[in-house]
Image (cartoon, rainbow, N blue to C red):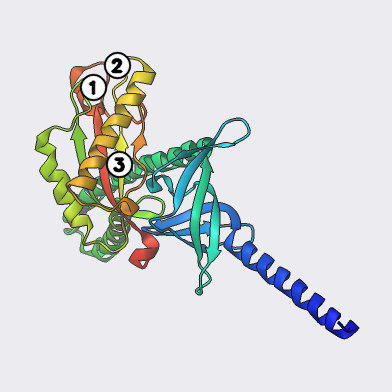
Amino acid sequence: MSHSRKVRAALFVLSSVLTLALLSWAQNLKVQGLIKGRNGDTMILQTSDSPKLVVLLTDSTQVGQVQGVLKARRKQMSMAALIPGLAVQVEGSYNADNQLVATKVSFKGDDLEQAQSIQAGLHETQVQTQKNQQELAQQNAALKAQNEALQQQQAQLTEQQQKIAANKAAIDAAVARFGQLDDYYILDEVTVYFGNGKVNVDPQYISQLTALAQKAQGVNGYMIQVKGYASSVGSVALNQKLSEDRANNVSNILLQQGHIPMTRMLAPGAMGESRQVGNDNTAEGQAQNRRVVVRVLQNKGIAGV
């Protein structure tokens, strides 16, 4: 073989090796980032290189939680665990639309607990919004009474009407914000109550849950949030387990009888004794705290806000 042929053969082999290496790299890409949004089978990931990397989830995507000191063990998890605020590592390859098609998604248990705590904190925002609306409604009632009294004073009528109009606009704006989480609108809500130490769902709530599921399926880009709670009677560990089982049982009804896809379910939240709404020193208050709250959410970005 001549020297030129040997050179061409060597270049061909080198080119083939580089091509195979590039294909292998493209098929085994690993990306780390923070989930900023979730809409069914699509995630928006914030990475060091991209603020809005689109990640596609498929039926074959493996979701797992790494465990152990060396993070060598992997616990299979539901796709519902992929919630906004969770730090993840995604393995996969890009499609023709420059979207990362995920084959594996991994995360740490501590990161999942932190993301769930952030989601739970959104409930406090809603409670404060409700309180603000009630206060504004009281102010509105007071202003109306004042307006009736000032009608006898023609000289001040125009000024008072302008004040009333300004306050009404503020109230309308507060009403428009009522029911919103940080990134979501709350479009519907059902609360399921449980007996002391009980986790099975009372049949009376089945129709409410299926009706909520049917209504949700008419909402563009909806997500279902399920949060379980317990009273503070008994041990903290037991109450944590009760809240988890209650949330899981309600979620199963939504999945099996309400026909909600797994990709539309946020991870069921086991809130234990947190977020008490009733006085646990009374039987009535304890009954109010033994509950699961189900909400239909819509991302503000999808809603066009």
Q: How many marks?
A: 3
Query: Residue 74 versus residue 229: which sits nearer the camera?
Result: 74
Badge 1 marks a residue whose secondary structure is helix
Distance, label 1 to label 2, CA atoms, is: 8 Å
- Amino acid type, residue under disc 2 in the picture: Val
x, y percent for residue 132:
32, 45
Badge 3 marks a residue whose secondary structure is strand
Q: Residues within 10 Å of mark 2 (few under 14, many from 20)?
A: some
At horizontal 15% and vertical 48% (from top left) the residue drawn is: 210
x, y percent for residue 226:
30, 41
- Amino acid type, residue under disc 1 in the picture: Gln
Query: Which is nearer the N-term, disc 3 or disc 2?
Result: 3
x, y percent for residue 229:
30, 30
From this view, report whether residue 25 is shown above or below residue 284: below
Closer mark to the observer between disc 1 and disc 3: 3
Q: Which mark is residue 233?
A: 2
Badge 2 marks a residue whose secondary structure is loop
Q: Quadrant of residue 237?
A: top left
- Taking the view exactly as shown, the residue that stands out farthest to the front is 1
From this view, report whether residue 106 is shown above or below residue 75: below
Pointers 1 and 2 in contact (C-beta within 8 Å)? yes
Q: Quadrant of residue 3?
A: bottom right
| In the displayed structure image, the side of residue 213 where residue 122 appears, left or right | right
Query: Residue 29 versus residue 244: which sits nearer the camera?
Result: 29
At horizontal 44% and vertical 54% (from top left) the residue drawn is: 61
x, y percent for residue 30:
60, 55
- Amino acid type, residue under disc 3 in the picture: Val
Q: Is residue 149 visible?
A: no
| In the displayed structure image, the side of residue 156 where residue 109 appears, left or right | right
Pointers 1 and 3 in contact (C-beta within 8 Å)? no
Residue corresponding to mark 3: 226
At horizontal 50% and vertical 50% (from top left) the residue drawn is: 105
